């Protein structure tokens, strides 16, 4: 799937150091040291955005560490182990909006 | 610490390289080229080198030099250096010697090619570079790992059908003459191949326990075993080697598998991990071939991803029992060989987003899946047969993907009907460009 260039540039501007990588025909964005909502421990964590449908979710955000006492499951993507929570956001937001909407899970 | 290197080359890429190198040239007696390679660690000091592309040398970049088989000019070297910089991949000088068997470098090769490799190392210091030398039926490799002063002679695996494992300096294993006297039809060298191959098995319950037992009987001597579970009562209906005492003691499944294998072949090299393979992923990468006997589609996807990324053939087995209404239960299963570069489990229609989504929606609610010993045994035996075929080529050329469908009610194993409608021979989901470490 081709993602709009302007959205990719916007994501890179808002989340410095973001890297794009493919696996299994899916594009992912690695966001280093993403700041989490206030009260989360740790405060910053590497995150991986899957902007397309995966496992029944329109998009997903994976974190390198578990941050709160929610129910977590795990996945291995791009040679790293990730943690994710069951959190569904609406379809259609821009890439940067997706990241923020997924972070609502931890507020 | 002594660095070891292991080069993996997909067979279609190897054939493409050889075909190009065999083309006659107007002034040169032979051709050379460059193979792009990704890198990954296989744990410890083992450097994996994963061949993913080939760059031929332009006809105009050969020099007319009767003293040399092939002499290339500065432009050819500049192009190779630029490719290293652009692709962020290592580069291996490749050429072809006539004859068969493990080839060796000529004196002129030894004097001149390392100088060229040094130029590549200057522009790509964090990547492995080196030399590949093909013969009519084999391949030798010398790898300069990042920072090393001298090359190491590498293991080479040509990944495809058949697999070709090339271990320089390792002679054929001597076996007790009677041990394998009933399986000479597997071919000359088959027993040596089985002794040298390192096989990973993920999941050591109903399916995996049969697999390791059969591999040990066949003469496989190197195993990496992964399972996070311990034996309980519910495993005793199907798990080879597990006893009531194991269920009481909560013996790990890896320990039971180790016991079964060691009882058949005491002199094995056996690494076990009591946990998820994802915690020891580097160890998995070091395997030449991996069996997956896992319960979930998501688990299969993760194993296939890891295998594709490291150019490892993956053999998947699984079964299920469904019941609709008042009809008798239907038992079905599959054996799939997922070969790097060839159609994957998504291409074959076995993995689908809808199926993964349904599984995720039922997470934690599905309960234990039906499993029985005879169907586990049929599927495991079929998978072991696929593995032996791949390693020994005893049935001859095969060019179709392996997707076998098990009908437990009819007692048949047949090629899956989807293969009739599969026209692609490659895979759009896992291109060779994606091998190796994903984030530079």
Image (cartoon, rainbow, N blue to C red):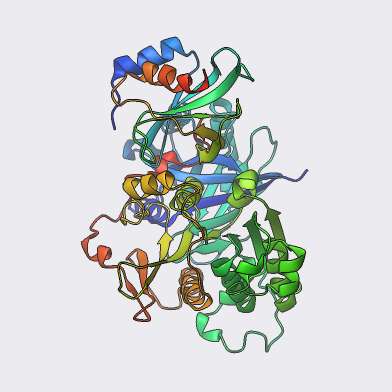
Q: Nearer the viewer, residue B214 or B299?
A: B299
Is B416 above or below relative to B286?
below
Is A71 above or below relative to B199?
above
Residue B365 image point, x, y percent:
47, 50
Within the image, what quadrant is residue B150 found in? Answer: top right
Within the image, what quadrant is residue B196 found in? Answer: bottom right
Quadrant showing the N terminus of chain A = top left
Q: Nearer the viewer, residue B107 or A80?
A: A80
Q: Nearer the viewer, residue B51 or B279?
A: B279
Residue B321 image point, x, y percent:
41, 68
Is A63 above or below relative to B10?
above
Residue A26 image point, x, y percent:
37, 36
Q: What residue sits 51% from the left and 76% below the top?
A: B377
Residue furthest out toward the front: B326
Residue furthest out toward the top: A13
Within the image, what quadrant is residue A73 found in? Answer: top right
Q: Is residue A36 left or right of residue B328?
A: right
Q: Is residue A6 visible?
A: yes
Q: What residue sits 47% from the left and 68% below the top?
A: B390
Q: Is residue A72 left or right of residue B56?
A: right
Q: Nearer the viewer, residue B379 or B269?
A: B379
Q: What residue sits 43% from the left and 39% below the top?
A: B434
Residue B245 image point, x, y percent:
76, 72
Q: Is residue B67 visible?
A: no
């Amino acid at each position: 799937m081709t993602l709009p260039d302007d959205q990719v540039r916007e994501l890179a501007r808002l989340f410095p150091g973001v890297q794009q990588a493919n696996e299994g025909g899916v594009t992912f964005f690695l966001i280093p040291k993403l700041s989490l909502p206030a009260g989360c421990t740790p405060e910053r964590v590497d995150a991986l955005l899957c902007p397309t449908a995966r496992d029944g979710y329109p998009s997903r955000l994976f974190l390198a560490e578990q941050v709160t006492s929610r129910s977590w499951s795990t996945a291995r993507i791009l040679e790293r182990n990730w943690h994710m929570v069951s959190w569904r956001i609406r379809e259609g937001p821009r890439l940067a909006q997706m990241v923020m909407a997924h972070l609502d899970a931890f507020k | 610490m002594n660095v070891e290197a292991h080069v993996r080359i997909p067979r279609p890429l190897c054939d493409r390289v050889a075909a190009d190198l065999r083309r006659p040239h107007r002034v040169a007696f032979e051709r050379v080229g460059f193979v792009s390679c990704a890198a990954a660690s296989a744990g410890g000091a083992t450097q994996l080198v994963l061949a993913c592309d080939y760059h031929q040398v332009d006809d105009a970049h050969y020099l007319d030099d009767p003293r040399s088989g092939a002499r290339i000019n500065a432009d050819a070297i500049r192009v190779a250096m630029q490719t290293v910089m652009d692709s962020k991949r290592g580069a291996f000088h490749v050429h072809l010697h006539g004859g068969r068997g493990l080839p060796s470098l000529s004196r002129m090769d030894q004097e001149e090619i390392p100088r060229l490799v040094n130029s590549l190392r200057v522009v790509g210091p964090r990547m492995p570079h080196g030399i590949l030398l093909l013969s009519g039926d084999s391949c030798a490799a010398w790898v300069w790992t990042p920072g090393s002063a001298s090359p190491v002679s590498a293991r080479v695996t040509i990944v495809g059908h058949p697999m070709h494992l090339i271990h320089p300096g390792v002679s054929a294993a001597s076996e007790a003459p009677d041990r394998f006297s009933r399986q000479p039809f597997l071919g000359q060298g088959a027993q040596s191949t089985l002794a040298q191959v390192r096989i990973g098995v993920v999941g050591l319950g109903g399916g995996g326990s049969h697999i390791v037992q059969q591999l040990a009987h066949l003469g496989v001597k190197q195993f990496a075993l992964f399972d996070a579970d311990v034996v309980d009562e519910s495993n005793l209906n199907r798990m080879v080697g597990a006893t009531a005492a194991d269920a009481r003691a909560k013996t790990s499944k890896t320990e039971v598998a180790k016991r079964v294998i060691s009882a058949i072949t005491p002199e094995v090299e056996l690494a076990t991990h009591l946990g998820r393979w994802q915690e020891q992923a580097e160890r998995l990468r070091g395997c030449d071939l991996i069996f997956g006997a896992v319960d979930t589609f998501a688990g299969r996807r993760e194993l296939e991803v890891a295998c594709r990324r490291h150019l490892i053939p993956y053999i998947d087995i699984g079964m299920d029992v469904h019941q609709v209404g008042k009809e008798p239960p239907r038992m079905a299963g599959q054996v799939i060989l997922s070969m790097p570069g060839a159609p994957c489990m998504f291409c074959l229609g076995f993995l689908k987003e809808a199926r993964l989504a349904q599984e995720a929606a039922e997470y934690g609610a599905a309960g234990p899946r039906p499993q029985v010993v005879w169907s586990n045994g049929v599927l495991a035996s079929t998978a072991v047969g696929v593995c032996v075929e791949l390693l020994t080529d005893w049935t001859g050329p095969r060019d179709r993907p392996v997707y076998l469908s098990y009908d437990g009610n009819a007692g048949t194993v047949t090629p899956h009907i989807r293969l009739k409608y599969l026209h692609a021979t490659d895979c759009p989901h896992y291109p060779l460009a994606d091998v190796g470490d994903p984030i530079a």
